Image: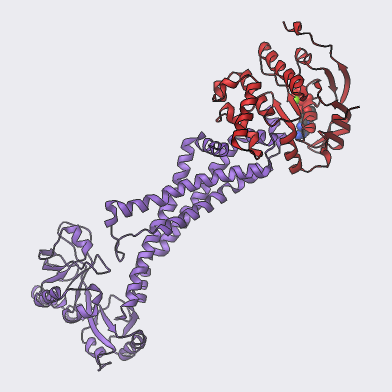
Chain colours: A purple, B red
Amino acid sequence: MPLRVVYLYRNLTRNLSRTLLTCCAVALPMTIYVLSMAVIKGIDRFLDNSAKQLRLVVGHKTSIINPLPRGHRAKIEALDPTHQRIMSICGVRWIGGTVQNEPHPLSTLAVEPDTFAQTFSDYYLTTEEMADWQRNRQAIIVGRATAQRFHWNVGDRIQINPSVPPYTPFEFKVISTAPKAIDPITNICRLDYLEELTKQAVTIVPEDWKLQGWVSFFFVKCGSQADVDHFRVAIDALFAHSPDETRTQDEKTFINEFIKQQFDLPRNLMILASLTVFVAIMAAANTMSMNLRDRMNETAILKSLGFSGRVIFGLIQTEGLALCLSGGLVGALTPYVLFTYSPLRNFTVPLIQTLEIQPIVCVQAMGIALVIGMLASAWPAWVGLRLPVISALRNLE
Amino acid sequence: MPESEIELRDVRKVYYKDRIDIPVLEGLNLSVPAGEFAVLMGPSGSGKSTLLHLIGGLDSPTSGSIRVADSNLEQMNERELTAWRSRNVGFIFQMYHLVPVLTAAQNVELPLLLFRMPSSERRKRVATALGVVGLGDRMDHRPNQLSGGQEQRVAIARAIVTDPRMILADEPTGDLDAKTSEEILNLLNTLNTEFGKTILMVTHDPRAASHGQRLLHLDKGVLERDERTPARAPAAVS
Ligand SMILES: Nc1ncnc2c1ncn2[C@@H]1O[C@H](COP(=O)(O)OP(=O)(O)OP(=O)(O)O)[C@@H](O)[C@H]1O
Ligand SMILES: [Mg+2]
């Protein structure tokens, strides 16, 4: 093996625990970066699908927690008597839900059953499933990840406790696990079933609880992008100055805004990743200057042997790069291997199906590790470059 | 008359520290012909190491001219000096200064990193250098597996592996017992007589000094005495 490589290797293994700890300090931000990018890319994919679906989301103007009357649907439909520009409209109500003895909340929506399949054609229900959906008021489509988690199969009878009145357990029959839906988490049940049970359970309800005849949103499926742009304005104009004014957005904008309001995952992940990169630079720089300080004598000797400042600079820089690149390799490859080849590949995140880690992101992470290495060894390398041989040699005597 | 290998004219070296001038060498003249083994003695602080560093291009004089191995050092910049050093000078220090994590052979190979040569040539040179110092069988030992004398031999092999014209040794036996010192000094004699290296050695030990052909005495920044040592009879080793 060439002496340069041997020397590099020996230098890195002189203080093995120091090297390993620094590698970890560099590996961690790379892992965070790779995972963050996977989440962000996943969200992007979800949003891209939304954009393709040509759907508008109509909510209450004041707040998304204010419901809208179901009567709005007919008024919106009337905007397009041809039914060529507004293809279908589906009212949706959030009911959340939990499973008995399971603290983790579910994501469940109750939807107007007649228009669901057409409005959400990206669920790709089969003819058979659609028939089941229409026939059975207790029908529920469970997200495939949710189904996997609770071992639910098509045909099973299941129980969910809704997070809205009447809060009593609901019986459902699983008719599909929506294998092709972009959202693997959310369950879909029928709004008429919800309203019926509510009516039975809650006998005296103040009118302003708005339990009957109200939805959280309308999803409006349009015929073309031009129609999306047109009705986004037209719908809000229709209800202006009415008691229930609306706010209409295309689905991509709506979800994006929702993500930002709830937790702004992409932004926070990037902040986290940047902070850890910063910490990694400090850790690696500290290691490199300790390495240099431990080897001041040796550096002076190398210079007396005729090693120029530049060669010394290169040696130290190479060492820093090798250190950080090995950290980066571990940090980028670990999540790649785990989420590509281990059972973790079935891991799901809301909105995102599975964390898909792209090789290009790993390459980017290595690029960042490279920059960390350069920055971290810049100062020690400069000190090595400038090291006056004479005074260093005198210190040795 | 053959040109001198080392030629110093009116060399002054003044250190400047805490706003005070510290004159170390004052108008020093010295000429060492090629192939000579000269010994430099003098009290501590007299400037011996300083002089050695100037001749080896590790430091530059305040004034005066230094001509070594056909180059005028005072006219060269640091990069030129570094390159010149790697080709012309081998340094040996009191404390050996080997790289602890490399084997003897790898330590000796280090200076060759600065030269472009096939690896077979590299290996040959390393083996030759270690053979000359009598450590052909210790190639793969780490410094901590070697005795002080053996470490100094490795340092000497490292100094000669690039085949420099001159060897500058600063108290090379200062840390060794009498017997080992004798071996190291004999080795230097071999390098001088058989390989024609010019040697300038600093020492405090009069017995070590007797190995040279010429004794220079430095005191308070000037050469006090400059004498030929009597030819050393092999029997003198006792
Ligand atoms: N960087 C410096 N700044 C100030 N003074 C210095 C510096 N380097 C050396 N000196 C001084 O120069 C003088 C000569 O030092 P030098 O090391 O050459 O002496 P020496 O003859 O080798 O001594 P010794 O036998 O102890 O090794 C000393 O008085 C020392 O204090
Ligand atoms: Mg000295």
Q: Position of residue B136 (x, y in %)?
A: 59, 21
**Residue drawn where x is 27% and y is 87% of the image:** A86
Q: x, y percentage for residue A339? A: 32, 54
In this orientation, does residue A208 appear? no
Q: How many labels, in total?
A: 0
Q: Can residue A170 be seen in this view?
A: yes
A259 and B3: which is toward the camera = B3
Q: Position of residue B217 (x, y in %)?
A: 84, 20
Against B65, is A129 above or below?
A: below
Q: Residue at x 76, y 29 (%)?
A: B165
Q: Quadrant of residue A84?
A: bottom left
Q: Classify residue B201 as left or right of residue B219.
A: left
Which is more toward the observer, B229 or B119? Answer: B119
The quarter of the image that holds ligand 2 is top right
Residue shown at the point (60%, 31%) measured from the top left: B123
Q: In this view, does A290 lie to the left or right of A171?
A: right
Give the position of the N terminus of chain B as an image quadrant.
Answer: top right
Horizontal side, residue B120 vs residue B165: left or right? left
Residue in front for this viewpoint, A128 or A50: A128
Q: Is residue A113 above or below residue A384?
A: below
Residue located farthest toward the bottom when viewing the structure as drawn: A81
